[in-house]
Image (cartoon, grey):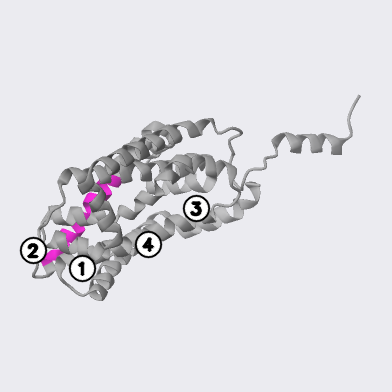
Amino acid sequence: KRQPRNLDELRRRQEFATSSPVGIIREDQGSHSFLYIIIGFMNIFVFLITYRRYKVFRQSVAHSIKKPHGFFINLQERIIIPYKQSLFILVVLALNGALVYSAFLYFYRNHLLADYLLSLIFFTPWLKDWAIRMVWDQTFSIIVSTVSIVLFFYMLALFIKLFSFFGRSRVLFNQALAVTIWAASPFVFLLPLGVFIYSMLLMMKSYWIIIGVLLYFHVWVYLRWVNGARVLTDKLYGRVFLAITFVLLILAGAFGYFYESYYHVLQHGEYLKALKVFWK
């Protein structure tokens, strides 16, 4: 028997309807969460074992968080933290950061806007194909993100080293690297987040709390890093903060101008905004 047309349309809408947020295909089950949970728990377990077993490492972590200024002064006076300690905390923080960032990438892997952002960053077809393969491969994404974060720390250390050339104080690269790593020590409080981040993204309807927490810690660590750079270069905090922030804003502005000139980002943004009605 032929069904009325409006009933057919209703069934068709129910078949293709989704309760997920705009532009996202939500996972029905958290089967993809296990990798983040296993690696996250292993990361916490290794950190806690090391923290409890080695008193010097425990004191370094506590001192860097509670009294960062005094900690950075010790580094300025060439009281260098053992490199193994710095390398260990760097790997722990980088791995946890990789869990968080790769979880966000994997969660938004079907999002139209996320795909467009990947097209902007990886603007050649073969790079875009590599990026998509990385996002969909959780293990590979975590490895690449971990290595990228470690390299980013080294770049920040190199930035302090170059910045010191404009002052009288001679800063060793090992000092700059130690300041950069230990300035990020408060991120140890976010180790549990790396375990449950993907599960939280699946269950929560609004992510502003997670984004707010991440933004707070990033700003906190940035201010600590600026303070460390100020102590090493023996300059006033206000001047160092303004100088570093100004340089970073110039770089961000140049980056934005390049993409707007060659890829018309704002125009494409308006196009995506117009297409938003089709994401629902």
Residue 46 drawn at (x, y percent):
32, 37
**Start and end of the magenta stretch?**
149-165
Residue 40 drawn at (x, y percent):
40, 38
Mark 4 vs mark 3, CA separation in Å: 14 Å
Kind of residue at badge 4: Val
Kind of residue at badge 2: Arg
Task: Characterize the magenta stretch by its predominant secondary structure.
Answer: helix
Q: Are marks 4 and 1 in contact (CB under 8 Å)?
A: no
Give the mark nearest the N terminus, 3 or 2: 2
Q: How many numbered discs?
A: 4
Q: Are marks 3 and 1 in contact (CB under 8 Å)?
A: no
Q: Where does label 4 land, which residue?
A: 219
Q: Nearer the viewer, residue 228 or 113?
A: 228
Residue 203 drawn at (x, y percent):
59, 43
Kind of residue at badge 3: Ile
Which residue does the image show at 89% across and 34% down from the upper left? 4
Which residue does the image show at 53% across and 56% down from the upper left? 208
Mark 4 vs mark 1, CA separation in Å: 16 Å
**Left-right relation of 147 to 209:** left
Q: Where does label 2 land, which residue?
A: 170
Tell me if residue 80 can be seen: yes
Label 4 secondary element? helix
| Residue 146 is covered by the magenta coloring | no
Dividing the image into 4 quarters, which one contains the N terminus? top right
Give the mark nearest the N terminus, 1 or 2: 2
Kind of residue at badge 1: Arg
Mark 3 vs mark 2, CA separation in Å: 40 Å
Occupied quadrant, residue 50: top left
Give the mark nearest the N terminus, 3 or 1: 3
Which disc is residue 210 wearing?
3
Mark 1 vs mark 2, CA separation in Å: 13 Å
